[in-house]
Structure formats: structure tokens, C-alpha cells
Amino acid sequence: MYYIDPHIHMVSRTTDDYETLAKMGCVGMSEPAFWAGFDRGSVDSFRDYFRQLTDFEPKRAAQYGIQHYTWLCINAKEAENIALSREVIAMIPEFLDRPGVLGIGEIGLNKNTPNEATIFMEHVDLAVRYDQQILIHTPHLEDKYQGTRMILDMLCDDSRVDRSRVLVDHVEEHTVRQVLEEGFWAGMTLYPISKCTPQRAADIVETYGVERLLVNSAGDWGPSKPTAVPDFMLEMRRRGHAESTIRKIVYENPLEFFRQSQNFKFQPPLEASEATTA
Ligand SMILES: [Zn+2]
């Protein structure tokens, strides 16, 4: 079965990982901008990172038949530096027309501080002014519930925000309900040691259904597993779910969400009638 990983940080992955993902059925992915593991010192550092995301990674992915898309922002960890954050936000429009740029993300909160909230709202304003979709990072562990609530309140307070064009990521059992009930899309991040496991994600699907739910691997430079989406597919099969149910979550839902972005030009794998050779 084909699938799309809607949240994976391939800049921290090897070319071998692209090959493995392709062999497992990955045909598309989206890569949000995130923290590099250290705080960057200047706006030019972000400009180069955005070139990597919009130019180099799509080419690396294409060698394995994977279509690569991206999201741009300064992440919540570096948002404590308000001056640098504003320089980055002012620079982002240089890239918004580039092929494969789906919107603004992953923006959100990390430690739920006032500076993070300020820069979050300035990113939302940027997204609205440029008619961009939004991808949200919610905080980890003990900060998650409060941070998710703060994020949803800030989004709901801005009447310009179209909730059907916002994906709230890293949801867990205690945050998924409010995200879905308030009209947003929800993403479950499958991590080997924190966040969600494939088993917990399958439980959530069985509780909340398949509408507006996505699964992703995050696949970053920390302990993570880039093949976590196939692990979820296997778990769903083990439980006796129909292939159409699995396909809806790992393929059709990402397509439906991403198609709201004008830069999403996904080409589905060829069917027999479209192929140039039999
Ligand atoms: Zn991420």
C-alpha cells in the first residue's frame, strides 16, 4: 500500500532512509521546519535552511520516487529570541511561492512562555495574510495539555483562521478530542520512547474514527523511527481493520489536507492505463 508521511525531518536522515521508505510504499512526505539541535545565530542561517528544504531535499527524495513538500517558520524553541524571530518571519515570504511549500509550520509552543505565544500569533498572522495553511507543534509531556489548550484558544480567537486548513500535530489521548471537536485536523506522532506508539494510535483511531486524523513518524535527529507509519499500518492489519480504513488514514487524509495548498501538485503513482510501458 502507498502511504504519505505528513511530518518527517529528512534533513536529519540519510539517503539510505529515503530508499528504505520508498521500498515500504512511501510516495510522498512533508517536512516542517524545526529546531536544528542548537540555536541559530542569524536570519541568513534560516535562509540557507529554507533553501535546503525547498531545493536540496526534494531532489534527494525524487531519486527514490518520493514527492517532498515543506513548511517554513522559526520554531518555538528559538522564538524566545523575539528580534531574530521577527527577522525570520519577515524573510519567509521570499520562499512562499517556491514549489512544494505548503504553508507555515511547525509553529506552536514549547514551554508555553509569553514570548513563544507572541511569535506564534505573528506566524498565524503571516499565514492568514499570505493565505497559507498552518502546521502546529504541540509541547511534549507535562506541558502538552496546557500548551495545546493555549494554542487552540489563540487560533479560535482569530476569526480569520480557517480551521479546516490547520493541522495540530503530536496529539495524544488527552488532547485529540478537543482538536477534532473544534474543527482542526489532528496528527499523531509515533515515537519509540515518548509521544504515541502504533498501538496507542490504533486505539485512538478506534475511539475517534478516521476523519481528519493523520499519523506521522517525525523522523528527526532524536530517538525516532522513520518507518513508524508502516508499523502503524501493520498494527491496524493485526487488529483486523480493512485496507480501505488504513489507506484513508495514511494516504487519502494527507492528500485531502494538503490539496488545500496551491503548491501541492502531487502526482499519484501510475495506474496500468497511464503507464508508458506495459
Ligand atoms: Zn517536527
Image (cartoon, rainbow, N blue to C red):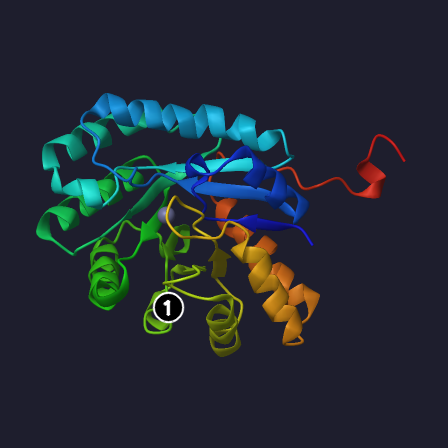
Q: Residue at x 67, y 45 (%)?
A: 23
Q: Which residue is mark 1?
A: 172
List x then y, in percent, for residue 119.
17, 43
Q: Residue at x 65, y 35 (%)?
A: 65
Looking at the picture, does residue 270 appear above or below residue 1? above
Residue 71 left/right relative to 212 = left
Look at label 1 and name its amino acid. Glu
Element under disc 1: loop
Instruction: Classify 10 Å Cα crowding around label 1: few (below 14), some (14-19), many (20 and above).
Output: many
Residue 265 left/right relative to 155 = right
List x then y, in percent, for residue 52.
41, 26
Q: Determine which quarter of the picture holds residue 103.
A: top left
Residue 207 left/right relative to 95 = right
Residue 90 in sight = yes
Looking at the picture, does residue 47 appear above or below residue 205? above
Residue 99 in sight = no
